Amino acid sequence: VLALACIDQGQVFVSGSADGTARLWSLSNKFCLRIFSEHSGPVRSIAALDQVTFLTGSDDTTVKVWNALSATSLRTFEGHTDQVTSVTVCHDGKIFLTSSADCTIKIWVLTSIQEENDSDSDDDLFDLNDFTCGASIKEVD
């Protein structure tokens, strides 16, 4: 187990594993409710967007948005060139941040959670390359 995050007001939690899966667990009966298995590398980071939706960051360089009820991947975010080491959510789920072994921090502005095969996106991506104090944010196309 490489990562943990509570969702649904602490009734369930999600774990990330070296086998590339995330698993949804019930705290009350300690039972695995669902397995999420679309990553091709270890899941190193998890963050809850709301009571039903969560993010996973993986060694496969992607971040996925999942629906915990249906166990489906809603979106895949690409932009890192090495493993995603951390995912965190801020601003009521409108913004999330990712860090990577590629020495970047990316700030993602989430405008909607669209279906996986919907390629039109209004999301904004900002990239902090080699982030240091005083670094400026530059927009990535």
Image (spheres, rainbow, N blue to C red):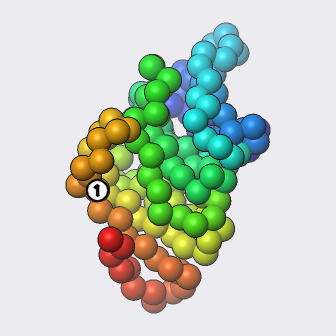
Check the picture and name the quadrant holding the N terminus: top right
Check the picture and name the quadrant holding the C terminus: bottom left
Secondary structure under badge 1?
A: loop
In the rendered structure, the answer to whether residue 117 lies left or right of residue 100 reads: left
* Residue found at the very far top of the displayed protein: 29
Residue type (three-letter) at the residue carrying disc 1: Asp
Q: How many marks?
A: 1
The answer to whether residue 3 shows anywhere in this view is no
The answer to whether residue 114 shows anywhere in this view is yes
Q: Which of 97/125 is in front?
A: 125
In the rendered structure, the answer to whether residue 79 lies left or right of residue 39 reads: left
Check disc 1 and report the residue beneath it. Answer: 123
**From the viewer's perspective, is residue 129 above or below residue 4?**
below
Kindly identify the residue that appears in the image at 68 percent across and 13 percent down.
Answer: 31
Label 1 Cα neighbours within 10 Å, binned few <14 / some 14-19 / many ≥20: some
Kindly identify the residue that appears in the image at 34 percent across and 39 percent down.
Answer: 117
Could you tell me residue 19's position as x and y percent? 75, 37
Kindly identify the residue that appears in the image at 38 percent across and 60 percent down.
Answer: 108
Kindly identify the residue that appears in the image at 38 percent across and 80 percent down.
Answer: 137
**From the viewer's perspective, is residue 44 above or below residue 124?**
above
Q: Which of 45/29 is in front?
A: 45
Could you tell me residue 97's position as x and y percent? 46, 60
The part of the image, by quadrant, that contains residue 75 is top left
**From the viewer's perspective, is residue 100 above or below residue 67?**
below
Could you tell me residue 9's position as x and y percent? 47, 27
Could you tell me residue 54's position as x and y percent? 47, 37
